[in-house]
Structure formats: structure tokens, C-alpha cells
Image (cartoon, grey):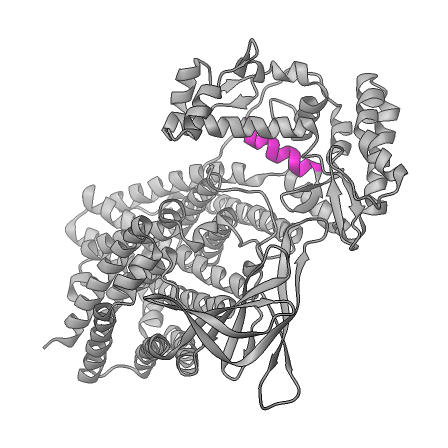
Amino acid sequence: MNWKIGSFVGIGILVVILAVATFFEKSFGTDFVVRYVYHSWWFVLLWGWVAFSGCAALLHRQFRRSLIALHASLLLILLGALLTFLTARRGVVHLRQDVPTVSFQKETPQGKVTVRLPFTMRLEQFSVHYHPGSEMPADYETSFTIQEELTDSPVSGTVSMNRIFSYRGIRFYQTSYDADGKGSYLSLNEDRYGIPVTYAGYFLLFVSLIWILGERNGGFRSLWRNPRLHRLMMLCCLLVLASEARALPTLREDRAQEFGCLLVSYQGRVCPMQTLALDMVRKLHGSNSYQHYSAEQVMAGLLFYAAEWDAEPLVRVKDDGLRQALQCDKYVSVNQLVQGGNYVLQPYVEEYYRGKHSKLNKAAVDLDERLQLLALMRQGSMMRVFPARQSDGQILWYSPVDSLPASTPRAQQLFVREAFGWLYEYGVRREDDAVLRDMLSKIKSYQQQYGGDSVPASFRLRAEHWYNRFPVVGMLYKINLTVGLSLFLTLIFALLKNRSLPYVRNPWMRGGVWVLLGGVFVLLTTHIALRWVICGRLPMGNGYETMLLLAWLVLLLSVLLNRRFPALVSFGFLLSGFFLLVSGLSQMDPVMTHLVPVLSSPLLSIHVSLIMSAYALLSFTALCAIVSLLLQVLHRLPDCRLAERQESLLLLSRLFLYPGIALLAAGIFVGAIWANVSWGRYWGWDPKEVWALINLLLYAVPLHGFRVFRVPVRYHLYMLFCFLTVLMTYIGVNYFLGGMHSYA
């Protein structure tokens, strides 16, 4: 029997089952697919068959030690998973103050079962730590004691998010807490055999991946030295922008900037008012400004000159169907939506909340929500610019319409209630520039005096002002897509005509392309670095940030490798432009917020960096495939020339495939370690976890020497199919399947 074929047939069946299971999970729930698929006896046997046939294939052939180590690591990981499945105990402990706890709730296929603990637990204290100046939790912490019957002194333990406590082989994890703050839920995991075996597999995996990539006579280094790769070759183009002007009442630009320098508590953090203004204008108008007015001027106009700005067609109606129903253009004024005291969206919104969720009703609700934000801003509830100290010492930020703590001095309360009224009455309405400036200065002084440690450091505020002033992403995606498409078409033309690229021959054009590539890379690097400074963390916490990272990694690869492989310049521009374009989609939110406590782990940064680096490399394999298939379709070269070009593209693709798979595998298993530290389990069969595993299984197939992949067309078609699974993993899961990873 051909054990190698048997192993990959099993993998193929696994991939189909895993993909189908994620869609069943969407319809029937996680418990259903866990019970009938992932934890079923036949699924375990299928994994066993894959492992057994893989071992048999290894024994029947001689492999390099690095490959043996790699496959041994995968077997160890599977063995660890099996031991965990068979021997581990999991459950939830509920602790209440002054109440001894002697048992926990264990999940079984038949339901929850109460199991006695080998000791007694007592909750000493539960506390929630908040980000300065906000009510957004930064961490949850539970302090408790463990008392055994035969010992006199209790053992103290503390658990928080991403920080576990181990006792007698039992690991405790922070899970949840009671609403009154006097109780805490801890996950319990006892896995004495699975953890050491699995960790040994992870360690061997990382060692073997590095070994394979660095091995002198290995496949990756042989590809790198292949002379055919030197023959791959590519041009340049520019983009120009324009604007228009119009007169509307608002603050002067310099005063609007001062207004934008005020601090406000927004999205769970303290930031410049400029940030709130930008987000508000983006939500209402779909851009960072309106005509020649800055976001701060637009916001000031909406606040202080409501009548004039309500007549302005500022609000974007995104849906064509809604525009037809309302008989309006792409942009409407607030007055057009409120005619004769009647709110024109009301019938559609009411239908939506009665259960009619058509595309038209959803569009109406979306527009209504944006208008409600405008109303909240005008009412003052979003203008949380006044810090005040709570009785417990925590500093929170309040709006003029909020109730301040009873302990707040009367003079301070009066200033909070009246400051904006004085600002409008004496500064804006009477057009007294000196008074306006003085009031803005007093509000700023108040913030510095009472804000305490909730006021961001000055360097972070400067970074945020620069970040807001130069929103480069919207410009870069246009430039990169335009240049990338031009260079890509030039590459195809040159390959078809069997010519070298113009800029390769011309040093001036070559220099221009490299300068443009370097400039784009520096701009994006600066943008990401500023976001890093502002957030105080690596910007990898949501879909927008990971797309920026992916675009940056693609450009980095192009910068590093363009001398050896000039064709990568077009790939870099085109792919980075596409990723930046996707980052600007409505589903991607560029607003900076604090991470939820479970995501505040250095393992998150490592996990996301590895996965995004893998996707960047694998995206290059997809572009190699597109170029090769276009050459095949537009077949105007002699057969020998066409075969040579396609073979060269295959080699280049495999050059990216090796490190791509290595980084993907490392990223997946770092994510598993993070999950074990945070939740007490390596793998939860979440849809994104499942599709990442599918990616790994599919991309690994061409590296196993199957003859079918020696034909370039077949290989490239397969790589395009694989990249579709990457898109499904990153985009499809987020927006169609959901799951715990849908925050990304």
C-alpha cells in the first residue's frame, strides 16, 4: 500500500469535514459540532489514520533528519491532544466572599456535573482594574486561599487575565465575575500528561522549522540558489488629487485647532477632541474633511452653528436602494431627513425593529444610528471633557450634562455645567476671539489640573495630532494600486514580448521606482509607529491594524528582495494597495481603543505577527500564480520560452511557500500556547482556528513531492485555490461565520 497517498487522502477528507463543520456550527451552534464531529469517535479515528499512515510513509523512505524532526513534532502534538482529550479534567469554580467552595462544575456530554475539589477554596478579594480616565476594564484579578484538610496554613493564590495559578497539577484561569463584584468564576484545568507532551511537540516544531529553512542542502536554500530565479523581471506611475471650497459659518482654522487640542474621553480612552471630530466626520460624510473645512471646523460648525449646517448636504447615504426610496442624492442634509416635523427614516426604522431586516431597512437603521450620534454630540453627552475624582480615587471624565460625584467641590461643578455655555455665548455667538481663546485655555487648564494620571503623556498627544493631521492610508492605497497595476501590466507585457522591463535598463527609471517604493514604505512605517505610540501597544488588535501590518510586511519584502527579484516591486505595490484598500472598508474600524483584558498579552503580538507574515508571503505565491496563468491564457511566446517563464514563477512561488508555511505553523501553535495561558485549552475548534488549520494542511501538500505539482499550471491553480482559503480565514470567518476571533 502507498502509505503516502493514504495519508493525504485522509488529510483531504479532514479538510472537507473541517470546512463543512464550520458552516454547521453557524447554523446549529458550537456544542452541536463539538459533540457530533470534533469529539466523535470517528473523527478521532480519522486523525489516528492520518498519523499512522504518515508514520508508515516515513518508515518506508529515507528522509533528512530535519524532516523527520518536523513530522515527529506533529505526531507529538497529536499525541498530546489525544492525552488531553482522554485524561484532562475541566470545569468552572464559582467563588463568593465569605463562602467556602469545595466543588466545581464539570461539563459532560450529558450536561454539567458537580465534582468535589480535593481542597477548600475561599475568595479573599475580587477587583477590576480600569484604564486611567475610563470605565473600560484593563484587568480582572481574583485573590483566594486554598486550605487542605491535613495542613494548618492555607496557600494564597492570585489569578488574573493571562496570568494563571497552578496548585497540585490544577491550573486556574480568570473567566468571569458576579455583577455585584463579590464573586468570581475561575476555569479549572487538570492536564498532567497532555501539557508536557504538547509543549515538547511545540518546541520540536519550532526547532525543526528553523532547521529546515537553514539546512544547507534543503529545499529552501536550493531554491534560493537557483539561477532561473535571477531572470524574473518590471515600471512606474503617479496619481494627483483635487478639492473644492465653499463658505459656511464655523470657527477659524487656528481656533478650531485649539478646540481640537482639548481632551475628551472617547471609545474608552482619553484623546484629543480632534480624534472625536475625525471619527464623527468619517461616520457622517465618509471622509476626513468636508470641502475645505477640517474635521475640527466641521464639528464646531455642527455644535455652534446647527441651523446653517443642518441645511448642508453633509450626511452620506450609502445604499442605492435607500437613496431611491428617499428620492435623494448621495449626500443629504439633516433638514432633508426631517421634513415638516416628520422624520423620513422613521417608517423604515420601525419596520426593522418589528423584524423586517431587509437591505433597505438595515441601511435606514445605519443612517439613523449615525444621526443619533450627531444628536448625542449636540446634547453634550459625548463631550466628556471634564475629569473628576471618584470617592474611591479613580478619575473619570464627564460631560456637561452628566451628574458629577457628590464629593466634587461646588466651584468645580459650576465650571463643568457652564463652561461650554460660556464658550458659546461669549466666544462664538458674540464673535469675541479673545474670550473664545481664554475659555479654551481655561478648559485645557482644568483638564491638566484635575485629570491626574488619566491625561496622556505629552509625546503621545503630539503623536496623535500628527497621526490625525496626515491620514496617509487613504492616499497610499490609491498610489499603490495605481503604480502596482501599471507595473503589473508592464510585467505581463514584458514577459509576453520576451523583453526586459524599461526601468531595469534605464537607471533613472530604476531609481525613480526604488525611491517611490522606499517613500511609500517609510510613510506607512511612520503611520504604524505613530499608532503604536498612541495606543501604547503593538497595533495588532483589530482587523484594521492587522491589514496595515499585512501591507507593511508585503512592502518590507519588496524592499528587501527587489534587487534580486525586480518583479516583486509590482507585487509589493499591488498587494499593499489591495490590503490598504480593504483596511478602509466600512467593516474595518480605524478608531483606536484599549484591548479587552484577554488580548493584553505579548503572545498576541507574536501570534499576529507570525500569521500576518505568513499571509504576506503566501499572497506572493498567489500573484505568481496569476502571472503564470495569464501567460498561459495570452500564449504568444514560443513553447520553450513559456515553459521557462512558468517554471521560473513556480520556483519563485516555492521560495515564498517554504517560509510562509513555517511562519503559519509557528503562528498557529503560538496562538495555541496563548489560548492555553488565557483559557486553559490549546484548541477550541473556533471557526478561525479551524480554517487556519485548513490553510496549513492545504499549503503543505505541494512540498511533499507529488508529480502533479511538477506541472506549473496545475501547481499555480492549486496555489490560487489555497489563497482563497486564506481569504476565507481572514475575511470570510470574520464577517460570515463569526466566533471568538471575529473581533479581528
Percent of width and height locating residue 348:
43, 22
Toward the left, the furthest residue is 1
Q: How many marks?
A: 0
Taking depth in this image into account, of 635 and 574 the one nearest to the observer is 574
In the rendered image, residue 342, in percent from the top left (x then y), is placed at: 53, 13
- Left or right, residue 43 beside residue 668: left
State the image quarter where residue 16 is shown: bottom left
Residue 159 in the image, given as x and y percentages of width and height: 60, 70
Q: Residue furthest bottom?
A: 150
Residue found at x 42% / y 28%: 352
Looking at the image, which is closer to me, 733 or 482?
733
- Residue 85 appears in which quarter of the rendering? bottom left
Above/below status of 360 relative to 622: above
Reply above or below: 498 against 665: above
Can residue 368 be seen in the rendering of this structure? yes
- Name above or below for residue 539 compared with residue 351: below
Residue 282 located left or right of residue 366: right
Q: Residue at x 9, y 77 (%)?
A: 1
Q: Position of residue 277 (x, y in %)?
A: 65, 33
- Left or right of 716, for residue 268: right
- From what the image shows, is residue 369 above or below residue 394? above
Q: Is residue 277 magenta?
A: yes
Nearer to the camera, 561 or 673? 673
Is 613 colored magenta in this rendering?
Answer: no
Residue visible at 46% across and 47% down in the picture:
510
Q: Is residue 217 something one can see in this rendering?
A: no
Q: Nearer the viewer, residue 272 or 212?
A: 272
Please give the range of residues in magenta. Answer: 273-284
Q: Main secondary structure of the magenta part?
A: helix
